[in-house]
Image: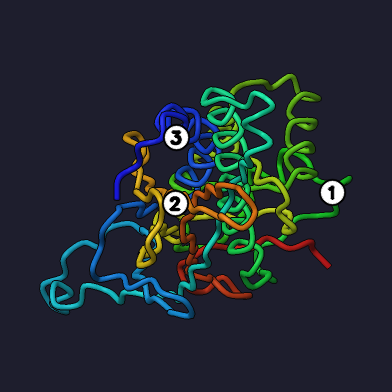
Amino acid sequence: MALTSPALTLALPALFGNIKPALDTVRRIGPTDFSAEAPEYVVAPGATVKVPVASITAASEYNDSTNNYATGGATAWATLNAKHYLQGFDITGVNVDEGVDAGRMRQIFALRAGSGIAAACMKVMKDGLDGLTASTAVTLPGLSATGIDDYQTLGSDVAWLDRSGAVLALNAAEYANVRKVFAAEHVIGTEKELAEFIGFGDLLCVPGLTARAVIVPSGSVGMLARVPTIIAEYREAGVQVDDDSGLAVGIVVANDQARNRVIVNGDVWFGVTALDAGAAASTPGAVKVDTAS
C-alpha cells in the first residue's frame, strides 16, 4: 500500500535532509551498501551476514618465475549483524483538535524520524570501530604529549598500509588536539587538507567514539542498510529512497483505534562490518590506535 498522507508526502525531503549529515560521515569512513534490494543479503531478525571486505594495497608486479598471476589474494569475510532501528511519533485526535495540521505533522515526523535514524546510524558505525582490537604496534603518546610529528608518523611503520588512501577517524578529544597542535604551528585548512598534511587521505571526528583514533584503509570498513520486510497490513506503508545516498527507509502508518491515535514510524536495518588488523597490525585492515605504554 502506497503512502498517501499529505503530511508524509511533504515530510520526505526533510526526513532525508536530517539524515544526510550522518550518511556523509559514514560514507567517508568506508563503502556503503544502501540498495533497497539485494537478494544475496538476507537481513532478518538474528541473521548473521558475511560481507567481503579487503584493504586495498599496492598492486603486485607480475613475476613470471613464481606465476603470481594465479594467486589473486585472499578475500576476508567479516561478520555483520544488522539491528532494527525505528523512530516516529503518535498523533491523536486531541492533537488534531488542537490544530496540528499536515505541515506540523511533517515537521514533527521529519525531525524525530530523521534525527533518530541518523543517530542510530552513527552509533552503529561508532560501535563497529570501537569493537576493533586495540593495537600494540600502532600507538600514540598521551594526549597532552601528542604533537604533529606523532600524527605524521602514525602507522608509517606498517608495511602494508597505504596512509594516503586511509581515513583517520578520531574521537572528539583527539580531534580537538589535532586542531590545537596544528593551530600552534599556524597550520590551518579543511579536514581534507589537514589529513593530507599528515599523510592521510581524510580526517574526521566520529562523535561518541571511545577509541582515540582508528586508521581505516580503503575498503576495510563497510556499512549495510536494508528496509525490514513489511508483512502486516497497515493503513499506509511504503519505502522511500534518498536519490543522493541510495538509503531506503520504510515508513508505516498504523491505526490504534482504542486510543484514537495514528502511529507513524520510519524504520531501517543498519549493520557495520570491519576487517580487523589485530593487535600487531600484521593483517591488512582497520587499525585501532592505542596509547603507548
Mark whose residue sits in front, 2 or 1: 2
Tag 2: amino acid: Val
Residue matched to label 3:
8
Disc 1 secondary structure class: helix
Where residue 121 sits: x, y (%)? 55, 52
Which quadrant of the figure has residue 155? bottom right
The alpha-carbon separation of the residues under discs 1 and 3 comes to 47 Å
Q: Count residues near mark 2 (Cα–Cα under 10 Å), then give few for <14, some for 14-19, many for 20+.
A: many
Q: Secondary structure at mark 3?
A: helix
Mark 3 or mark 2: which comes first in sequence? 3
The one nearer the camera, 54 or 235, is 235
The answer to whether 135 appears left or right of 60 in the picture is: right
| Residue where numbered disc 1 is placed | 143
| Mark 3 residue type | Leu
2 or 1: tag closer to the N-terminus: 1
Is there any visible trace of residue 168 in the rendered image? no
The residue to which callout 2 is attached is 252
- At a point 34% along the width and 48% down the height, the residue shown is 239
Q: Secondary structure at mark 2?
A: strand
Which is more toward the observer, 189 or 85?
85
